[in-house]
Amino acid sequence: MEILLFSSPTVQPDFDLIARVPNLGIASIAGCINDICSVHVADVHGLKKKDHLAYLERSIKKYQPDLVGLSCMSFQYSDALEMAKRVRQHGIPTVMGGYHPTLTYREIADSPDSQYINFIIRGEGEATFRELVRALPEGKFDHIRGLSHHNGTCFIHNPPRPILDVTRLRLPDRNARLINKRFNIFGKAVDVVETSRGCLHGCKFCSINCMYGRTYRTFALPRVIEDISRAVSHGARSVLFVDDNITQEPKRLMALCDAIIEHGLDHIHYHTQASTRGIAQVPGMARKMADAGFKFVFLGIENTIGRNMDFFDKRSRGDEAEIAVDSLRDNHIIVSGGLVLGTPDDTKEDLWSNFRAVKDMKVDIPIFNVTTPYPGTRLRQEMLDLGLVTNPDDFTRYDGLTANIRTRHMDSRQLQLEIWRMASRFYDIEWMKYNTIRRTYPLWFAKRTARIYARYTRRKLLRWGKLRDSDDFFEEDLRNRSYNMSVC
């Protein structure tokens, strides 16, 4: 049996200015089925040219698959559906998985989209996909937990599958990948590894609890070290840990750092996301991470205004973000700070208060996210009830950076405009002096900065010549979905 697994061709706006990474989920599924079928993985967002549909057609012709799997998040669903339509034209069954199909499977099943989708895998895909492959020859699927399947008339939704025992999962199959180039972070070849799944926090804006429940499961450290070693043997010179909350157990992260050093893997550059509390409350955590080779941490600062943190159900001490940023910067680790802006009572001044806070902290790369009512989250229902969701169903805009809501004091356009202005004013001369990126990745920094300031100079000249103004540039970036690296 021949299986093809595709990532979505769509990447988050501006994200690939810094990183483009392969899809770990489909590689993990490949590793769990490669003993019962032939499987190939296509990370089509890594294609040099945006010809994913042509690539899909060529792959179908070459491999003649019995089943094609597609993985997507909410903003990627539309493109994944377009691929499913192409696959169905060849009479090949399709299966959809990932966050969006998991959280909206009933809506998809009841929509016209269902004619292009044979199966939906809800939640973690490894065990469900394996059982689906085994069941394909006989066409009987009622026993497969976590699967929704079309019976020719309508979709049948089988009972949910309990969360997996991750200690029984096989390693990802990197040999199954068809596309291996163009994946990098700060210009260094990258691969993806996970050391745990889930998070015990209950932030109302987050989809993780909808996917896994409020759980936290860890992979054995020897398995993690083996996975890193395999990634390195496949050419990785940097590793992105995609854990939902790698600092959930700080002592375990310290032990992971020790294991990396012990096995001589500290020459690799490591990148991860972390909670401010996980870094701030453990003396020596940042030092240990630096010793192990960590070069970049995305910190979930979320917001610097107390009432907004309460609204998000985020419980943190007021100075945790400052302590975490200082600790990481003192150890020459690049800090990206994620903010979530646009709560019901936010004003223009509230937004700029957050801007000044991350500026004062000397965050290297701020990510000005907009509060997004993702399907299945508590936030979505609350914002709908308040009448503050301005775009309830065009999920192509649910990328975390586009305003799909308003506040009681700003409409969507005003909210988007202020966040755009904040992003455009962050990268000033002061930032040039203090940022950590130029020390760690000088060549990447020089190239990227040259592009940013060339764009700035061009726009400045157009404004001086009264050929364009800031509103024109905002409209241009709005069309291009370029929000966090704009210059007005």
Image (cartoon, rainbow, N blue to C red):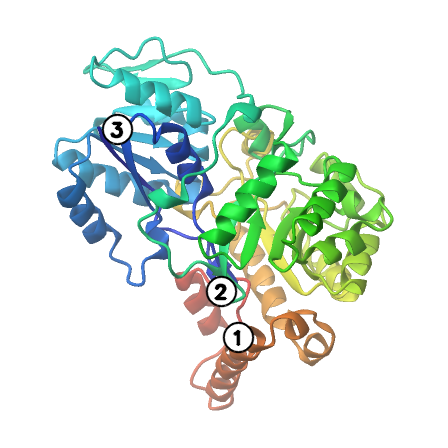
Query: Could you tell whether 153 is left or right of 212 in the image?
Result: left
Sequence-earlier tag: 3 or 2 = 2
Q: Residue at x 49, y 32 (%)?
A: 375
Cβ–Cβ below 8 Å for labels 2 and 1? yes
- The circle on residue 448 is 1
Q: Residue at x 56, y 39 (%)?
A: 388
Name the residue type under label 2: Leu
Q: Nearer the viewer, residue 63 or 395?
A: 63
Q: Is residue 268 visible?
A: yes
Q: Residue at x 81, y 64 (%)?
A: 330
Q: Gap between marks 2 and 1, in whole Å?
A: 8 Å
Name the residue type under label 1: Arg
Query: Could you tell whether 46 is left or right of 363 in the image?
Result: left
Residue to which mark 2 is pinned? 17
Sequence-earlier tag: 2 or 1 = 2
- Note whether 413 is above or below 147 in the view shown: below
Q: Nearer the viewer, residue 449 or 132?
A: 132
| Of the two numbered discs 3 and 1 in the rendering, the one whose residue sits closer to the viewer | 1
Q: Residue at x 68, y 53 (%)?
A: 347
Residue to which mark 3 is pinned? 117
Residue pushed farthest top?
143
Name the residue type under label 3: Ile
Q: Gap between marks 3 and 1, in whole Å?
A: 41 Å
Image coordinates of residue 294 in percent, x first then y, are: 67, 56
Q: Gap between marks 3 and 2, in whole Å?
A: 33 Å
